[in-house]
Image (cartoon, rainbow, N blue to C red):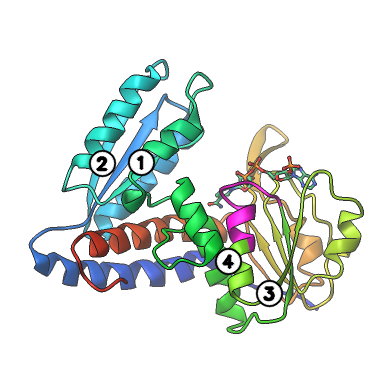
Amino acid sequence: MTASIIDGKAIAQELRARIKAEVASFRATGRAPGLAVVLVGSDPASAVYVRAKARQTVEAGMLSFEHSLPADVDQEALLRLIGLLNADPAVDGILVQLPLPSHIDATAVLSTVDPTKDVDGFHPVNAGRLATGDPAALEPCTPLGCVHLLKSVEADLSGAHSVVLGRSNIVGKPLAQMLLRENCTVTIAHSRTRDIAQICRTADIVIAATGRAAMVRGDWIKPGALVIDVGINRVATGDKSALVGDVAFEEARERAAAITPVPGGVGPMTIAYLLHNTLKAAGRRSGLPST
Ligand SMILES: NC(=O)c1ccc[n+]([C@@H]2O[C@H](COP(=O)([O-])OP(=O)(O)OC[C@H]3O[C@@H](n4cnc5c(N)ncnc54)[C@H](OP(=O)(O)O)[C@@H]3O)[C@@H](O)[C@H]2O)c1
């Protein structure tokens, strides 16, 4: 079997077009939704992500507010900025680009963002709402994108055994909650899991979010499984470098029914769901029915 490729770029483009149309309707309220992005330091990969987020925010018809702070900014100054953004009526969504420098307590920073403006869905209130099935949650963008990609192939995921590789707060754990909501049977594996290859072979759905290049081999994949590769790993190829996922793509595509590429799979969905969450937050703050 050669897998079909799940085209995250095209699916994200469709989603962004829908969001843009909804933003145009929202603007009839007299204002545009606004997203503030806070970047601390000058990590080149983070700067690229922030620029892409700002560009796509504007393309969707929303306002983008960018705040760049030096790498040595003190935590109090960062918390003060978040306080100002929390209070600013033009700002519907606040995103603090991770990772933060080591002298800053990321948990304290993320917990300071107003949960109603927490478009990354990382605030403990939103994590708790997701875990308890409260629809008021703003939910993390990358897991939302993964579920959307799965449902583009298989509308009903009910009963599927899903193996999530990785248990981070930003991908693995929220994704497991969302897959439970889709009535999947969920196994979460991590660096201490025994017989991980054997567990994967029992999966109808494999989602890899470990940050380990090409860790998931072809013979880990049950024939006909769906494979979502969240990983983004830069590896050296001769005197150049390339981006690869956590799945050995060429091997896995020989067994899977459908698979996401890297790049062009989950990545574009993450930004599209950031726009979705910003519009959702704006709608709620304006008392409109939720999108
Ligand atoms: N496409 C996107 O938009 C997007 C968004 C976010 C992240 N990512 C990418 O997704 C990957 C994961 O991100 P993250 O933030 O979740 O990473 P993270 O916080 O470093 O978590 C990695 C998880 O993988 C587990 N793990 C590491 N090595 C493993 C191994 N050999 N076997 C089994 N499990 C292993 C870790 O287990 P322990 O808990 O036991 O340490 C941990 O739970 C990274 O490549 C990241 O760049 C992509």
Residue 185 image offset from top left, x and y in percent: 73, 72
Q: Is residue 256 above or below residue 252?
A: below
Numbered disc 3: secondary structure: loop
Residue 213 got which mark?
A: none
Q: With 95 as the anchor, is 184 left or right in this view?
A: right
Find the magenta span and give its range.
Answer: 166-176
Does residue 241 appear anywhere in the picture?
Answer: yes
Q: Disc 3 designates what residue?
A: 184
Question: Disc 2 and disc 4: Cα gap in Å?
Answer: 27 Å
Q: Disc 1 designates what residue?
A: 113
Q: Earlier in the sequence, mark 2 or mark 4?
A: 2
Numbered disc 4: secondary structure: helix
Q: Are marks 3 and 4 in contact (CB under 8 Å)?
A: no
Q: Earlier in the sequence, mark 2 or mark 3?
A: 2
Mark 4 beta carbon near ligand 1 (under 8 Å): no
Q: Are marks 2 and 1 in contact (CB under 8 Å)?
A: yes
Please state the quadrant of the image where ligand 1 appears: top right
Q: With 217 as the anchor, is 75 left or right in this view?
A: left
Question: Disc 2 and disc 3: Cα gap in Å?
Answer: 36 Å
Q: Amino acid at mark 2?
A: Asn
Asked if the magenta segment contains residue 244, the reply would be no
Which residue is at the front of the view, 172 or 142? Answer: 172
Q: Are marks 2 and 3 in contact (CB under 8 Å)?
A: no
Q: Amino acid at mark 1?
A: Val
Mark 3 surroundings: few (<14), some (14-19) or many (≥20) residues within 10 A: many
Q: Earlier in the sequence, mark 4 or mark 1?
A: 1
Q: Amino acid at mark 3?
A: Cys
Question: Disc 4 and disc 1: Cα gap in Å?
Answer: 23 Å
Residue 178 got which mark?
A: 4
Q: Amino acid at mark 4?
A: Met
Q: Disc 2 designates what residue?
A: 86
